[in-house]
Image (cartoon, helix red, strand yellow):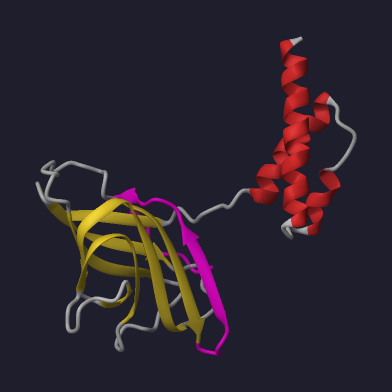
Amino acid sequence: MVCKDDLSMATAASRLLLARAVAGGSPIGCRMALTTPTSLTSLLILAIIQGCLGQSCDSSIYVDKIHSWNKGYTGKLYLEQSWLDQQTADWKLAATFAGQLKQFKVWDADIVNPAPLAGKNYVANVSSVEIINKCWNQVLYPCQYLELNFMVRFPDSVSDEFSSDFDLSAVTQTVTYNDGSAGSRGYCGPTSGQPTTPATTG
């Protein structure tokens, strides 16, 4: 009877989540899951919830740690751009790290949030940053990777060269296209190292 009870609980939980999804404006297709609860529909409802509520992310993201030491690392970020509809007029990245950094530094982009001190290319005590293109690297094409060098410094209390507690955990990219329209892409946590295949178009 435990299995039956578990399925009943799953159905009730699923229907509650689906009701919240519908109330929150989820796609209309999610509504079809509100059916009579049986053991089969419980599984179907759970599967539909994952499809309706689950947010997929792009796994074509890489970070190559070029140099590591006991107080941080320098890395190169690679984001495949095959999702772009056309070439870009500008781009912005919102990057989240696994822990709070003592310092984040970047050379080929400008940090806009939090705002750095005047004339500086780094920010301190952050776990997320927003950066935008420089005036000379705003154009991206679907056949390339966006490549960006950055540096992370660990908090003073950390001295483990191999720590992953301050690795990049997610990136969201937003762009403005040449025609004025916009697009965005959410990337998962990165794969370590460089890409092993060229970027592909669309």
Q: Quick check: can you spot residue 83?
A: no
Looking at the image, which residue sits at the far right?
A: 36
Whole-percent x and y of residue 63?
29, 55
In this rendering, the answer to whether 122 lies above or below 41 is: below
- Quadrant placement of the N terminus: top right
Q: Which residues are magenta?
A: 178-202
Whole-percent x and y of residue 66?
16, 56
Instruction: Say which of 70 and 124 sits in front.
Output: 124
Residue at the (29%, 87%) spot, across then down:
136
Task: State left or right for residue 192 relative to residue 65.
Answer: right
Whole-percent x and y of residue 2?
72, 12
Task: State left or right for residue 60 relative to residue 180.
Answer: left
Residue at the (40%, 75%) spot, across then down:
92
Task: State left or right for residue 201 relative to residue 61.
Answer: right
- Quadrant placement of the C terminus: bottom right
Residue at the (81%, 24%) spot, across then down:
39
Question: Residue 27 falls in which quadrant of the image?
Answer: bottom right
Residue 127, magenta (yes or no): no
Residue at the (48%, 67%) spot, across then down:
82
